[in-house]
Image: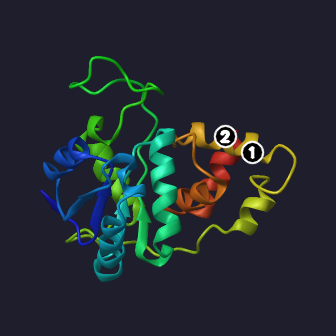
Amino acid sequence: MVKIQEAILVEGRYDSNTLRQIVDAPILETSGFGIFKDKRQLALLRRVAEKRGLIVFTDSDGAGFVIRNHIKSAIPGKYLKHAYIPDIPGKEKRKSAPGKEGKLGVEGMTREVILSALRAAGATIDGETAKAEAPITKQDFMELGLSGGAGSSEKRRCLQKKLDLPEHMSSNALLQAVNLLYSKEELWAILSEL
């Protein structure tokens, strides 16, 4: 069991059940799109985020990104960390058919994938120390042709695919994920291969 300081926000009870087998941390649920109507739950999430930090850990499908973006608009970014699972085709064991986009959600991920995503998000894990490096900036993205120019969205899509990141990420979310996973030198090397 890995002890994590921040609280973790997932979409539903099956995601919660999966995480409870892997991490020792407070795990909260959005009840899917229920978070849009539940002002008390959102107020609780704000308070928890301010007190101990909140890791948003939604599925990599379109619905997961709608929920993630709602949380991002409702809670100041300085209290949030974002964990992303890769786009992996398949269906969860409990389901008779895959979801609309045919991707596994948080509940279908392995222990290794979940822990990797949490580490990449910058989770505060007991017994581990985080590395500090100069961040990749929006200016770097512009200089690399990943934003603000002709073909930049296609170049970002290629990078997301190469890095096995969810396809629905905005350029800001991609920047955050790249900063969590790679150094500037590593990113330059990856882009030179594309």
| Disc 1 secondary structure class | helix
In-front residue for pair 13/41: 41
Q: Which residue is at 28% across, 70% downward?
A: 6
Q: Position of residue 8 (x, y in %)?
A: 29, 61
Quarter of the image for the C terminus: give it. Answer: top right
Q: Are marks 1 and 2 in contact (CB under 8 Å)?
A: yes
In the picture of the structure, the residue carrying the numbered disc 2 is 157
Q: Position of residue 45 (x, y in %)?
A: 33, 69
Q: Which residue is at 59% across, 42% downward?
A: 160
Q: Which residue is at 35% across, 37% downward?
A: 105
Q: Is residue 156 above or below residue 76?
A: above
Q: Position of residue 159 (x, y in %)?
A: 64, 43
| Disc 2 secondary structure class | helix
Q: Which residue is at 37% across, 56% downward?
A: 35
In the picture of the structure, the residue carrying the numbered disc 1 is 153
Q: Is residue 141 above or below residue 74?
A: above
Q: Is residue 99 visible?
A: yes
Q: Is residue 161 left or right of residue 12?
A: right
Quarter of the image for the N terminus: give it. Answer: bottom left
Q: Is residue 190 left or right of residue 145?
A: left
Q: Quadrant of residue 144?
A: bottom right
In-front residue for pair 170/73: 73
- Residue 115 got which mark? none
Residue type highlighted by circle 2: Arg
Residue type highlighted by circle 1: Ser
Distance between mark 1 and mark 2 Cα atoms? 6 Å
Label 1 neighbourhood size at 10 Å, few (<14), some (14-19), many (20+)? some
